[in-house]
Image (tube, coloured by chain):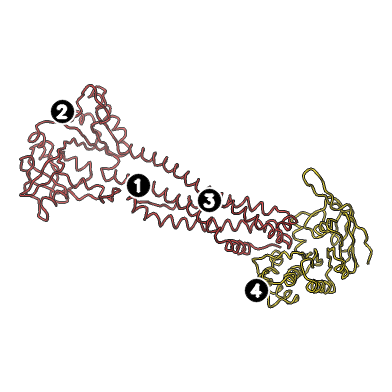
């Protein structure tokens, strides 16, 4: 299978006043298309930083990031917005839905920035909302939903633009065991449909669902083998 | 790939709507600023127009008046009136003057049958009617013949007619003034102009309370003296009036050995001075209005900055799902544009509707012109936009990762 994500010697440093704090110290990762990968590590290990860079939300201080044979590390910020919109779907621990928009509008958000017509947006969003089983909650605001339902809305939003990569940052962190399990099942199904799924977690139970676990400690990859 | 402008506007509008109170407060600020500019400009314009109208009613811009200079203490007791001889000399020195009317005035009791009325009586020449552009509505005015013969005739104002004769026709009747019976030969046209003063709705009402007799009759059959304290003249046109005034001033000063016991004024020059002072007023009021709008602008900027702070996380989420910096910028700018335009238009409407009310209250007609509305709108919308652009730029420059972490 072709290599979808290729990261070479990636370094990220944060400047805090006069001190430079290293978050990633030369990371190398290869992720193939269609993989289900878990990135595991304790808090402060740099796994969120890595996810932000993989998700084109942030740029590396040094090193190379090749996404789909394209060097992302040299791309302009404007183009990064387009990559986030077209190729990546994000799922966060805290859901990150817009509280004043209903389920339908939240899911339509990436389509709006992609420039779809209102009709097309409604149609595509309806379809993915049905896929995550929330058709009867389309007109509800996030505050009227349970944690599991909110996360399903977030997943619907992540996949509505049919991205090749789904990035999830502790997607079950705020959920009870049952809801968490449901969410992970959805990720497995999405992986089966061909999406490359990358989950960042510190929970071994979550990591078990993945085909491969990448351990990160102190900004370095410890073990890239299939577990 | 882009979010359309229409979408941005719908977006901005829903943002605007979800923060009703704040938007309302800001709109009120813009309304007040726009409104005050319109009201102030119209007020100054109204005063200007009204004063000019008054000048036109009182003989136009080519009129020149000579009166006793009350501001001069006259230490050498120089004569502060003209003799008939001097009047004739002056007239011969300024042949370019179209008309000239020397006049004397007394406050006397006028009686007809059992009715009495106290008012000003003027001794004038036929030129008076020409200078004031004021003719009789019935009968005739004083003629050269009346002057030469010192006829016992009188022309009365409409108020005098009303008081002494009621509905009766006064022409041909006799009024007794100062024990002399005067033949009524004419009634002056009624004068009216909307007034600024509370208590009187007619700015020209005093003219209707006057009577006129031949100057020669007043001199020879009345007081016996020929002391003439005021003169009115008319230049060929408004443009030549200031020059005529200067010449007249030089002649009169010369007659009085350089002592300024008379004031010589030209309506044209007064109008010019007035225009100049109106301009100063306009600028001062305009600056005040701009300051109030700047305050409105600062409020907008403040609200927008608070809004960005409040919505940092939202901006982070939008950037994550693919919003470009431009999309965020437009979203925030649309809100400002909405607020400033709604405020600007409402301010214009409120300002225009206030004109009548203010006008009724201060008795000055406020006259709005399209240019004033455009100035007010440009200034208020301009300031509003400037105040909104900087916060919108700041919002669009947020780092997505940091914005997402914001609580």
Of callouts 1 and 3, which one flags the residue occurring earlier in the amino acid sequence? 1
Determine whether A226 is above or below B207 in the image.
below
Of callouts 3 and 2, which one flags the residue occurring earlier in the amino acid sequence? 2
Label drawn at residue B85? 2
User: Which tint was used for chain B?
Assistant: red
Q: Quadrant of the C terminus of chain B?
A: bottom right
Quarter of the image where one finds residue A54 = bottom right
Quarter of the image where one finds residue A40 = bottom right
- Alpha carbons under labels 4 and 2: distance apart: 101 Å
Asked if the residue at tag 2 contacts the one at tag 3, i.e. Cβ–Cβ closer than 8 Å, the answer is no
Q: Are marks 3 and 4 on the same chain?
A: no
- Alpha carbons under labels 3 and 2: distance apart: 68 Å
- SS at circle 2: helix
Q: Chain of mark 3?
A: B
Rate crowding at label 3 as few (under 14), some (14 to 19) or many (20 or more) other CA atoms within 10 Å. many
For disc 3, the marked residue is B296
For disc 4, the marked residue is A139
Q: Chain of mark 1?
A: B
Q: Is residue A68 visible?
A: yes
Q: Are marks 1 and 2 on the same chain?
A: yes
Q: Are marks 4 and 2 on the same chain?
A: no
Residue mark closest to the camera, 4 vs 2? 4
For disc 1, the marked residue is B49
- Alpha carbons under labels 1 and 3: distance apart: 31 Å
User: Which tint was used for chain A?
Assistant: yellow
């Amino acid at each position: 299978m072709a290599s979808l994500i290729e990261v070479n010697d990636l370094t990220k440093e944060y400047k805090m006043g006069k001190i430079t704090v290293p978050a990633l110290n030369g990371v190398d990762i290869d992720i193939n298309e269609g993989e289900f990968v878990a990135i595991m590590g304790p808090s402060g290990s740099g796994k969120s930083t890595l996810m932000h860079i993989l998700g084109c939300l942030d740029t590396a201080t040094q090193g190379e990031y090749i996404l789909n044979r394209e060097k992302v590390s040299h791309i302009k910020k404007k183009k990064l917005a387009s990559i986030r919109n077209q190729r990546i779907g994000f799922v966060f621990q805290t859901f990150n839905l817009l509280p004043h928009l209903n389920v339908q509008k939240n899911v339509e958000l990436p389509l709006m920035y992609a420039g779809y017509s209102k009709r097309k947006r409604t149609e595509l969003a309806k379809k993915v909302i049905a896929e995550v089983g929330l058709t009867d909650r389309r007109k509800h605001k996030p505050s009227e939903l349970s944690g599991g339902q909110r996360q399903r809305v977030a997943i619907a939003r992540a996949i509505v633009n049919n991205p090749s990569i789904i990035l999830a940052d502790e997607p079950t962190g705020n959920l009870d065991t049952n809801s968490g399990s449901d969410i992970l099942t959805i990720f497995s199904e999405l992986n089966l449909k061909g999406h490359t799924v990358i989950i960042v977690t510190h929970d071994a139970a979550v990591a078990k669902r993945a085909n491969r676990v990448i351990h990160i400690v102190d900004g370095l990859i410890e073990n890239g083998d299939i577990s | 790939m882009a979010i359309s402008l229409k979408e941005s506007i719908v977006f901005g509008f829903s943002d605007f709507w979800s923060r009703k109170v704040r938007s309302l407060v800001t709109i009120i600020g813009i309304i007040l600023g726009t409104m005050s500019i319109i009201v102030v400009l119209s007020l100054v314009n109204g005063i200007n127009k009204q004063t000019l109208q008054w000048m036109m009613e009182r003989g136009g811009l080519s009129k020149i008046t000579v009166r006793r200079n009350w501001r001069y203490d006259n230490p050498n007791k120089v004569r502060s009136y003209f003799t008939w001889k001097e009047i004739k000399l002056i007239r011969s020195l300024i042949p370019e003057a179209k008309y000239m009317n020397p006049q004397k005035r007394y406050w006397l009791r006028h009686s007809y049958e059992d009715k009495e009325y106290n008012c000003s009586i003027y001794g004038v020449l036929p030129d008076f009617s020409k200078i004031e552009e004021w003719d009789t509505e019935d009968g005739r005015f004083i003629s050269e013949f009346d002057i030469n013969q010192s006829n016992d005739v009188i022309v009365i104002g409409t108020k005098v007619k009303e008081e002494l004769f009621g509905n009766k026709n006064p022409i041909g009747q006799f009024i007794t003034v100062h024990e002399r019976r005067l033949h009524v030969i004419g009634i002056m046209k009624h004068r009216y102009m909307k007034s600024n003063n509370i208590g009187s709705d007619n700015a020209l009402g005093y003219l209707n309370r006057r009577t006129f007799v031949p100057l020669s009759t007043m001199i020879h059959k009345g007081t016996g003296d020929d002391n003439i304290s005021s003169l009115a003249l008319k230049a060929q046109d408004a443009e030549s009036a200031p020059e005529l005034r200067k010449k007249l001033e030089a002649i009169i000063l010369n007659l009085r050995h350089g002592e300024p016991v008379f004031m010589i004024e030209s309506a044209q020059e007064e109008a010019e001075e007035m225009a100049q002072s109106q301009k100063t007023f306009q600028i001062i009021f305009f600056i005040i209005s701009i300051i109030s709008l700047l305050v409105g602008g600062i409020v907008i900027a403040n609200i927008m900055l608070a809004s960005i702070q409040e919505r940092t996380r939202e901006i982070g989420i939008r950037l994550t799902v693919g919003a470009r910096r431009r999309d965020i910028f437009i979203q925030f700018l649309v809100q400002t544009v909405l607020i400033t335009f709604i405020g600007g238009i409402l301010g214009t409407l409120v300002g225009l509707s206030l004109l009548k009310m203010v006008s009724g209250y201060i008795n000055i007609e406020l006259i709005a012109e399209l240019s004033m509305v455009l100035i007010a709108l440009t200034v208020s919308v301009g300031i509003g936009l400037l105040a909104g652009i900087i916060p919108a730029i700041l919002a669009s420059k947020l780092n997505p990762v940091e914005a997402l972490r914001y609580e």
